[in-house]
Image (cartoon, helix red, strand yellow):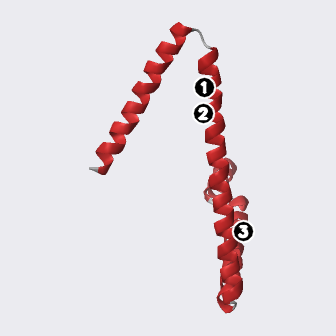
Amino acid sequence: MADDIEKSLKEIMRSLPSEEMYIESVREIVKDLIKEYIRKKLNENKELKKELASVIENYLEAKIKEYDSMARMAKITAKIGFLSAPESIREEATKDLIESFRKEIEEIILRTL
């Protein structure tokens, strides 16, 4: 009988939401309240809203430049690796690159049609 009660209590405890779930829920609610407060303040001050938009635009532009620079570095690194590789490997690598890009280009074309 005591074992049955203990088993039932354990099952009930397992079915209850965890403490972590409550803490996470409260965090989400607080985040939502903060967002609402910030939106309200931005809507009250049009100049601040414009300034924030400008800052976000500058940030996104900087990120795009960062990704562009990373892509250029990857391109140069690939060129250096390509030029330093033996001729037999260069030909095979070129074929593999062309084949993989061909597939991607075909997929893009098919999606746009």
Is residue 17 something one can see in this rendering? no
The residue that appears at 31% across and 50% down in the rendered structure is 112
Q: Residue at x 59, y 20 (%)?
A: 82
Q: Residue at x 40, y 36 (%)?
A: 104
Q: CA distance from mark 3 to mark 1?
A: 49 Å
Q: Are marks 2 and 1 in contact (CB under 8 Å)?
A: yes
**Nearer-N-terminus badge (3/1):** 3
For the residue pair 30 and 97, the one nearer the viewer reads as 97
Percent x, y of residue 42: 68, 85
Could you tell me the amino acid type at mark 3?
Arg
What crowding class fits label 3: few (fewer than 14 Cα within 10 Å), some (14-19), or many (20 or more)? few
Of the residues shown, which amino acid type is indicated by label 2?
Lys
**Mark 3 highlights which residue?**
27
Q: Nearer the viewer, residue 51 or 8?
A: 51
For the question of whether residue 78 can be seen, the reply is: yes
Residue indicated by mark 1: 79
Task: Identify the element where label 3 is drawn.
Answer: helix
- Mark nearer the N terminus (2 vs 3): 3
In the image, residue 28 lies at what x, y percent?
67, 69
Residue assigned mark 2: 75
- Tag 1: amino acid: Lys
- Residue sitting nearer the eye, 97 or 2: 97
Badge 1 marks a residue whose secondary structure is helix
* In this view, the mark in front (3 or 1): 1
Disc 2 element: helix
